Image: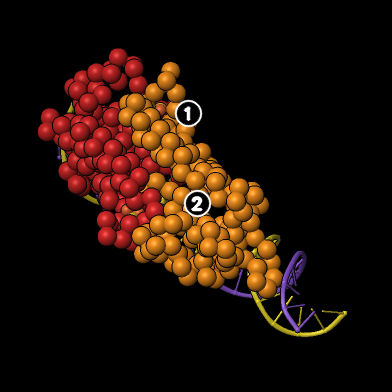
Chain colours: A orange, B red, C yellow, D purple
Amino acid sequence: MAIFSKTCEYALRAVFYVAQRSHEGYKVGIKEIAEQINSPEPFLAKILQRLRKEGLIQSVKGPSGGFYFDAASLNRPLADIVTAVDGDAIFTGCGLGLTDCSESNPCPLHEDFKKVRNQITSMLNHTPIGKFNLGLIKGKFSLNK
Amino acid sequence: MAIFSKTCEYALRAVFYVAQRSHEGYKVGIKEIAEQINSPEPFLAKILQRLRKEGLIQSVKGPSGGFYFDAASLNRPLADIVTAVDGDAIFTGCGLGLTDCSESNPCPLHEDFKKVRNQITSMLNHTPIGKFNLGLIKGKFSLNK
DNA sequence: GAGATAAAAGATAAAAATATCGTTTATTAA
DNA sequence: TTAATAAACGATATTTTTATCTTTTATCTC
Ligand code: FES
Ligand code: FES
């Protein structure tokens, strides 16, 4: 088990890659993205379609088209991507799977989980999509293995 | 997506329930456990079989039999249960799904994820299975909704 | 406008996780 | 030692997640 679904992992890696290329002034085709983040191409295509429908990423069809982020989108928090793909379970769900997590009906791990969740939530809310562009360009981070 | 798989959620809830009853001096049948933690009975049976094979929980067949924890097992950390069911991805895996998480080949979220993972790891390592027995007996915690 | 390019859409397929069922084996109590 | 009880085991079923393929639509270049 991981924090995010495979779908969400691909989404985030793709987002980081497209953000970097957008920062450099390019649009990117799905094929290039899939290669660079080491994901199955048609599956990733579906994921990006979804993000596009939600207005989280931009794209244009046709020659010299591809995916990109406009300036506003580059400043959105990662939390928006995660929510679009995995929903809000990671932000509000009970760690033991109870139907609703609350102070009045807590599971044994509620207090501990709340801290973990808050840390994840805070990190995802305060990290803009474009935050790692410079680091990625400098080759400081990996997205594919 | 959640921190743990459904399987692991059931496992932990069952463990807490059996621990409480063990503390009170009883063994518990699979039917009662499944009812009390609101899980599918045959599925839960499989999970507990697995835990038993690993020596994490005890059981006896036959009349007045059932599942229970011996004193030593009550002191084991929750981490042992989680590892048995979900493996160690939650403790060591990359948040973005890279094949191995390391300082030398970090993903963009590596530093942030490390903190989250460490917090989860620490909590699961330092929480013994029997920690919540008194609270559960007093009705302070919920395991079923 | 014609041809080429690339994403969108829709229908399937494969794999993994979750869930169920029927039978067997061990244990107990009488 | 027999009948009842409860877990173990093995096979199967369902659902969800992950992945693929084909056709359509939009856009660019010429
Ligand atoms: S009730 Fe389980 S985390 Fe809040
Ligand atoms: S490389 Fe991604 S969390 Fe360490």
Q: Which dot marks residue A100?
A: 1
D24 in relation to A57, above or below: below
Whether the residue under disc 1 has CB within 8 Å of ligand 1: yes
* Same-chain check, marks 2 and 1: yes
**Ligand 1 positioned in quadrant:** top left
Q: Nearer the viewer, residue B41 or D20?
A: D20
Q: Is residue B63 visible?
A: no
The residue positioned 65% from the left and 68% from the top of the image is A65
Local SS, label 1: loop
Q: Nearer the viewer, residue A106 or C27?
A: A106
Residue B136 point in image, percent of width and height: 30, 20
Local SS, label 2: helix
The residue positioned 30% from the left and 46% from the top of the image is B114
A43 in relation to C23, above or below: below
Q: Nearer the viewer, residue B48 or A86?
A: A86
Q: Earlier in the sequence, mark 2 or mark 1?
A: 1
Residue A119 point in image, percent of width and height: 38, 35
Give the residue number, with chain letter if any, for mark 2.
Answer: A130
Q: Circle 2: is it few (<14), some (14-19), or many (20+) Cα within 10 Å?
A: many
